[in-house]
Amino acid sequence: MDYLISIAIGILIGIFPSHFLFEKLFPSDKPEKNRLQILIPFLLDIIKGLFIVFLAKHLLNFDFLNIMLSLIVGTLFHSVFQEFKFQIREGQTVALAGLFLFIPIIVLIWIIIWLISFAYKRNKEFSLTSATVLTGLLGVTSSRIFNNEYWYSNPLAHSNNEFKILIGILFTLILTSQIDKIKAYYFKDKSKG
């Protein structure tokens, strides 16, 4: 029964068309986006991720598997089903905001790698890809370290394999939600040559 509740939380919050409602309530007269039009959808994604984990934590007895299942499903539905139709969009903000509530060290590592990558290449697509791939790999290969109360992980996974598998799924999902940006960055030079 808990699994069904986890999935329902992820679907209902993930599919909520926050960007669509924002665009309908505050239509843009100008084709270029101002800072407010970028900031509010970003904040809505953060709220979505936090709300998924908050509900899952408090309704499902602080169980790692149930919380991660809600977050994975919520990220999937946010990334794939927008405006109640199939439309790919980025899901890293929702996923990282949710992770921040129960594995903050993973989010901190993602931010550090993003900053280093951005300082190196000055390209957001490269930074997003680098941070997602490297943090996902680190989470999978170092599950024994991160699945530990000393890193303020709350709740802990029942086993390191559970941590490894679920973190791997979540970061793979984040990476696939960025596929258009990855293609645009990594294959633009090949199409010119």
Image: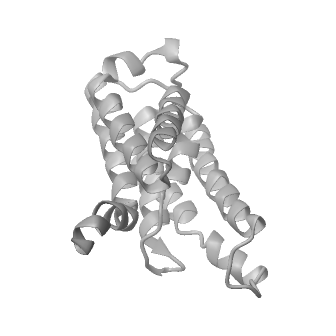
Residue 91, horizontal then vertical, whole percent: 48, 57
Outermost residue toward the front in this view: 193
In the image, taking residue 142 as reference, residue 9 lies left or right, namely: right
Displayed quadrant of residue 29? bottom right
Residue located 67% across and 64% down the image:
41
Residue located 31% across and 68% down the image:
188
Residue 1 visible here: no
Residue 159, placed above or below residue 185: above
Residue 151, horizontal then vertical, whole percent: 51, 17
Displayed quadrant of residue 143? top left
Residue 124, placed above or below residue 60: below
In the image, taking residue 166 as reference, residue 99 lies left or right, namely: right
In the image, taking residue 163 as reference, residue 78 lies left or right, namely: right
Outermost residue toward the top in this view: 150
Residue located 51% across and 39% down the image:
119
Its colouring scheme is: one colour
Which quadrant is home to the C terminus? bottom left
Residue 8, placed above or below residue 57: below
> Foreground: 161 or 127?
127
Residue 121, horizontal then vertical, whole percent: 44, 46
Residue located 22% across and 67% down the image:
190
The number of numbered badges drawn on the structure is 0
Outermost residue toward the bottom in this view: 29
Residue 10 visible here: yes
